[in-house]
Amino acid sequence: MRRRTVLAALGVIAAGDAQAQPSWKPDRPGRLVVPFAPGGSTDVTARLVAEQLGARLGQPVVVENRPGAGGNIGAELVARSAPDGHTLLMATSSTHATNLALYRSLPFHPLRDFAPIGQVSFIPNLVVVHPELPVQDIGGLIAHAKANPGAVNYGSAGPGTSQHLSAALLAARAGLRLTHGPYRGGAPAVTDLIGGKIQLICAPLVEVVAHVQAGRVRALGITTARRSALLPEVPTVAETLPGYEVALWNGILAPAGTPAPAVQRISAEIAAALRTPEMRRKLAEQGSEPVGSAPEEFASFIAVEIPKWAELVRISGASVD
């Protein structure tokens, strides 16, 4: 797709046009829909954003969890909501990139049915293993898995999730045969890893960092291109497998047709909040990297991410339906 076509499909208004519009203020409490269950990394970040955004807009922003179908239920709810700036979506690389390739049909279009507000953060996955697995790093894992094809079992939050795609890409790049065990969510997979029922998982850093620090699991590598400031001693997977990268992300979108003044005001307030030391500290505690991009930047970013995640789905062989 050509860039202008992509931006038009995403409902992005040029900055100059937006500046010509009157300023926007919410006239009632808003809601930030999280398309996943409470307690996960997306939910935690959404609550931080909602608190800051509500304070800056002068109206409360309430987090509403609508999990199901890999995030599609919550995303569809927002896509079908009134485009008045009072309903927002905490989107992720799953809802707005992976699912387009994973599902045969979606009840919404990730480009046409939303107006991007801004990217919030990048989130690394962490490759962790049970302490009894006789490996200390990614190189050791590769050697062990090659010597024992199919014997290393890894868990995920389900087919096509970032945990699945991260491990599948690792296996593909290193020429490994790993055994995938999908779960209904990341938490039970982590529980079984700690219990020794599986040997490996590539989980969002925030969901396993406490277990790493307590010695219940061993960290081998970060899936992003740079090391995490939270665990600087843990190398990236790419330091062993050059070119390997899986970077999860989240961001805020509104229904398509949301007025430009609302889009610009909400985007500016989120970006300002992400620049504060408090927000940067809280996101750093999760291992996340704040972004705070403008609507047009986020639109372009999503357009690039869709084919990238589609390739990961192809490599993994994942499918739903």
Image: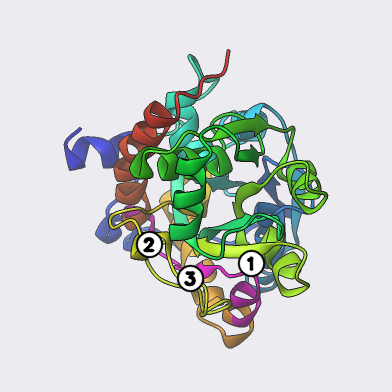
Q: Quick check: is 15 in the magenta stretch?
A: no
- Specify few, some or many for label 2: CA neighbours under 10 Å numbering under 14, 14-19, or 20 or more: some
Amino acid found under the numbered disc labelled 3: Ala
Colour pattern of the rendering: rainbow
Question: Gap in Å between the C-alphas at discs 2 and 3?
Answer: 8 Å
- Label disc, if present, on residue 53 of the rendered structure: 1
The answer to which of marks 2 and 1 sits earlier in the sequence is: 1
Nearest to the observer: residue 108 or residue 311:
311
Question: Gap in Å between the C-alphas at discs 2 and 1?
Answer: 15 Å
Q: Quick check: is 286 in the magenta stretch?
A: yes
Mark 2 secondary-structure assignment: loop
Seen at 61% across and 72% down, the residue is: 283
- Specify few, some or many for label 1: CA neighbours under 10 Å numbering under 14, 14-19, or 20 or more: many
Q: Which residue is tagged 3?
A: 271
Amino acid found under the numbered disc labelled 2: Ala
The answer to which of marks 2 and 3 sits earlier in the sequence is: 3
Nearest to the observer: residue 109 or residue 193:
193
Nearest to the observer: residue 119 or residue 128:
128
Residue span colored magenta: 281-296
